[in-house]
Amino acid sequence: MPRNLTLAASFLLFCAPWAIAQETVRWHGLELDLPAGWSVESAGDFTLLKPAGWKQGELTGEAYGLLFDAETPNLEDEDLTDTIDSAAEEILAGVTRQGEPVAGKLGSLPARSFRYATKNADGKPVTLTLHVLAGKDGCAALFVLGLDEKLKSREKEITAMLGSLRLEGQKAKKRAFGLGGGKKEDGAGRETVPAGQVPAAKGDKPAGDAEKPEFTRVPGGKELVWNGVAIDVPKDWRTQAGDDGTQILMPKGFGESGVLEEIYALCGDGSLQSLDAPDTMAKLRVALDEIQPGLSPKGDGVAAKFGALRGKTYTFVGENPEGQKVEARVFAFPTQKGIGALLALGFPASLQARQTTLDAMLASLRSKQGEGGAKGAAPAELAGQWVFFASFNANNGGGSSRQKVLTLRADGGYTYVAENVSTNPNGAAWGDQSDAGQWSSDGTSITFRSNGGGARTLSLEKRNHPKNKDPMLVIDGSAFVTATQRAPW
């Protein structure tokens, strides 16, 4: 973006005549369609995009425009992030980037989206997003700036405008951004197909394109396999397996402020096999009441497409015990173990600031047949807690002991904890190790896919203890004895 661009809070004040007819804007080899009633005005190094109804001298709380930088040749430029960070600071001083840029598609074009946040003098949250695309002789960017509450009211218009982005002269799509058959919204007015993933409409798939995947990977993300589906999690997020089969997803800095503003999780209900079941909404409310009591649905579930999976989006709203507004966004989809969902729960502004990242994650969803809990991949007879223990006593009074606890869940998840203790006349030393992820077995081998990345396949044999006949799993030569009572093999 132009390095000498100077924009401040006064940038939110504009006067503009406005037209009723929809207008096409051309900018350095790119085109986009303005929403009905919007107008355009050249302002030197940048072009302003002005919503309908703006009045001279009115503090609107929003601003939109197009920038261009000939010194940034393409989206792979090594200085792209620094350049956009500088542009963001010039547009609005004091903003802080929220996570890594998200790669995806806007309209028909590859894009990188950078999100920034701050607060105005009244303490209200302000968001700035720069969507960067490769133009004719450099990179162009469409920026969206405003109070969070204002941008939310414009969300349908902004989404449609971004979805119309294309190369100059390219035929505009006959559908809204990211949707295969007309505009659909969820209960919060959001488009239901994530940004960064644009499925082809019926009949418009190019010849020879049939083998391309329907999902979009998160650049640099790590694959998490859960209940037979895979999702990409940003590399700076942490994951933690829960005892009930859930996966907690924790963004960078999660919990550091001491205030739980947002939480994300993969969770599911094995008893719910279809999103069209009449009791779906009731079961969702019961599940949410265990986490945040008192939430009510905002509209009905709306059909959506998440990567290669079809599902529904649900929105629930309410207040926490302190009277603060709370929102739950439930992105539900089928898995090999019933209906699963990516749950986003927290303060609306916090969730909205994270939505671009969630959209990219949802766009990466795909089936993982035979892995991580796929049907038949996690035999129920192996599920349970298994313990390995060994000890050694030395002549000098020292010794060592090792204990490993392996928990295999029926939903295809596992946790592993190992503890080593060494003692000698001068003291003792402890060491421990833990892991979690997904497991599967074909009866003679067992495969562990760690949430931290990587997979291991080890030999597996079922035996009974030679003395008490307790069932054992001999994994790679180590005998794990059942920790719960069960019949011999």
Image (cartoon, grey):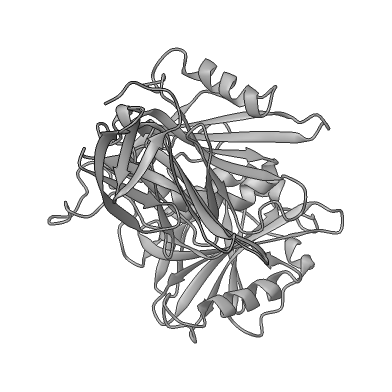
Q: Is residue 281 left or right of residue 311?
A: right
Work out whether residue 300 or residue 54 is closer to the camera in this orientation and state it.
Answer: 300
Q: Residue 294 appears at what percent x and percent y?
A: 70, 22
> Does residue 387 appear anywhere in the picture?
yes
Work out whether residue 196 or residue 35 is closer to the camera in this orientation and state it.
Answer: 196
Q: Is residue 257 left or right of residue 445?
A: right
Which quadrant holds residue 345? top right
Count of picture labels: 0
Q: Residue at x 33, y 39 (%)?
A: 309
Q: Residue at x 51, y 23 (%)?
A: 300
Work out which quarter of the rendered image holds the C terminus and state it.
top left
Q: Residue furthest front?
A: 395
Work out which quarter of the rendered image holds the N terminus and state it.
bottom right
> Does residue 432 appear anywhere in the picture?
no
Work out whether residue 307 or residue 35 is closer to the camera in this orientation and state it.
Answer: 307
Q: Residue 275 appears at what percent x and percent y?
A: 40, 23
Q: Residue furthest left?
A: 208
Judge whether 160 appears above or below 453 on screen.
Answer: above
Q: Residue 452 appears at what percent x and percent y?
A: 45, 57
Q: Residue at x 38, y 19 (%)?
A: 276
Judge whether 126 appears above or below 309 on screen.
Answer: below
Q: Residue 204 appears at what percent x and percent y?
A: 22, 48
